[in-house]
Amino acid sequence: MEQSIHDYQRSIIESEFPHLSDRQKGQLAGLYDLYTDWNSRINVISRKDIENLYLHHVLHSLGIVRMLHFRDDTRVMDLGTGGGFPGIPLAIFFPGAHFHMVDSIGKKIKVAQAVAQAVGLSNVSFRHGRAEDDSKEAFDFVVSRAVMPLDSLAKIAAGKIRKQQQNAMPNGLICLKGGELEHEILPFRKKAVCIELSTYFKEPYFKSKKVVYIPL
């Protein structure tokens, strides 16, 4: 029964994104055992939530795809990646883009690195440290999953964005957020774009989940 739950959750992802290749499906299929194994040693996902890995973590990460498709050679920083979300699902989905995953907690970066290596991702890099201290590289986009308030995220991200444009939307910040966001978005209301993930994903978990884009 346990396996069928994961098969069911993966089938939702495959139905939402029908153009996934067999390789991408295989990479996604490998995530559950890898995260379950690592999570027993280093807690990167709530113990109660590991059963919902594909819905609450993988599909949620792929909500960013509903905002923008990254073109090949796009460089993306995943700020506060934790165990690799949203970076690892996005790196699977966009094999032609590069994802640089940053987290201040070394053991979480260790998990993300191990998972990426195990599923054969070659379009990723990792750094243990604070994103604001990483001044050497510039990116097209910074992505993040609810690690801090929008104004704090935007301040850090603004120093990481390069000027050259190559995607359908101007370079900037794309983050996954939940709950009431009116006050957080207020300073950016004239330029922020916010989409409700419940428009696309019908599972109850996505009822209050949003993707917010701010050009920088």
Image (tube, rainbow, N blue to C red):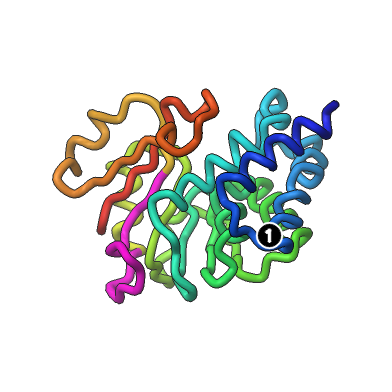
Q: Which residues are magenta?
A: 161-175
Please state if 78 lies on the left or on the right of 38 as rendered.
Answer: left
| Residue 141 visible somewhere in the drawing | yes
Identify the image quadrant of residue 142.
Answer: bottom left
Identify the image quadrant of residue 148.
Answer: top left
User: Main structural element of the magenta stretch: helix, strand or loop?
Assistant: loop
| Residue bearing mark 1 | 24
Q: Position of residue 135 (x, y in %)?
A: 40, 67
Please state if 10 lies on the left or on the right of 134 as rendered.
Answer: right
Depth check, front residue: 1 or 56: 1
| Residue 104 visible somewhere in the drawing | no
Near mark 1 (Cα within 10 A), the count class, few <14, some 14-19 or many ≥20, is some
Please state if 168 lies on the left or on the right of 176 as rendered.
Answer: left
The residue drawn where x is 76% and y is 49% is: 29
Picture quarter with the N terminus: top right
Give SS at disc 1.
Answer: helix
The amino acid at mark 1 is Gln
Whether residue 90 is in magenta: the answer is: no
- Residue 134 against residue 213 in the figure, above or below: below
Q: Position of residue 152 (x, y in %)?
A: 32, 43
Identify the image quadrant of residue 42.
Answer: top right
The residue drawn where x is 76% and y is 56% is: 26
Q: Position of residue 184 (x, y in %)?
A: 26, 34
- Residue 112 against residue 152 in the figure, above or below: below
